[in-house]
Image: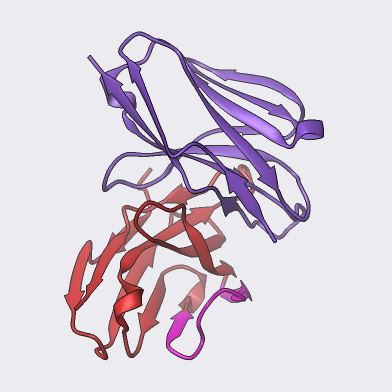
Chain colours: A red, B purple
Amino acid sequence: EAGVVQSPRYKIIEKKQPVAFWCNPISGHNTLYWYRQNLGQGPELLIRYENEEAVDDSQLPKDRFSAERLKGVDSTLKIQPAELGDSAVYLCASSGDRGGSYEQYFGPGTRLTVT
Amino acid sequence: GQSLEQPSEVTAVEGAIVQINCTYQTSGFYGLSWYQQHDGGAPTFLSYNGLDGLEETGRFSSFLSRSDSYGYLLLQELQMKDSASYFCAVDPYGGATNKLIFGTGTLLAVQP
């Protein structure tokens, strides 16, 4: 089966510019996660979707970050405007009913550099 | 707050055995997971412990002691391809929350 797909893999933007990341989860996985991973750190959850509903966005900086998951499949994470501190790898993951939360399938991530 | 502590780096030689420890302080506990991440790659699931004891999956084993808030990942017959970062992750809420808190990771360097 195809894994989690993310694009773009790399993005370099100037501060104050907008940026968007796209994720296509594993087919049939209802739960989708967006994480941010800073260099030398573990992934930190930004937002979690159950189907099309955002059920946990407590860690999402809502003043500049937004996300959507239309039709409960693909998802987009947006930053506007970007700040220098947003430089990180943005990971998308999905999970299904069989594995539960502890077995999440991650995409390769988008490495964002804000200059 | 939630905290998971792991050694930042571990070095071992090919063919050896290495243990990566994880201690946690979380508001709740419903299980400990381990993930492997190669440089520039995606984290991949390795193992899960919901109950105390040892879980074995090929060359990898994982142990949990809930009373000690402690677990470890044991890698046997190390290979060069095992050089990667290893993260422990705790599910603090259980049920339908589907939330994991990740540790800061241990960078394993396997030398020839």
Give the total of numbered labels: 0
| Magenta run includes residue A53 | yes
Q: Is residue B31 visible?
A: yes
Establish if B86 lies above or below B104: above
The magenta segment: A52-67
Point out residue A97 in the picture as x, y percentages from the top left corner. 64, 49
Front in this rendered view, residue B24 or B59: B24
Up the image or down, B101 lies above or below A53; here it is: above
Q: Which quadrant: the N terminus of chain A?
A: top left
Of the 4 image quadrants, the one containing the C terminus of chain A is bottom left
> B105 and B95: which one is in front?
B105
Q: Does the magenta segment cover residue B81?
A: no
**Going by the image, does A8 lie left or right of B38?**
left
The residue drawn where x is 31% and y is 14% is B13
Q: B8 or B55: nearer the eye? A: B8
Q: Is residue B67 above or below residue A45?
A: above
Q: Residue at x 33, y 70 (%)?
A: A22
Residue A11 falls in image quadrant? bottom left
Horizontal arrangement in the rendering, residue A16 relative to residue B17 (left or right): left
Q: Is residue A58 left or right of residue B83?
A: right
Residue B18, placed above or below residue A86 = above
Q: Position of residue B1 (x, y in %)?
A: 70, 61
Q: Residue at x 35, y 75 (%)?
A: A86
Q: Residue furthest right?
A: B67
Percent position of residue A100, x then y: 64, 47
- Res A102 seen here: no
Q: Quadrant of residue B47?
A: top right
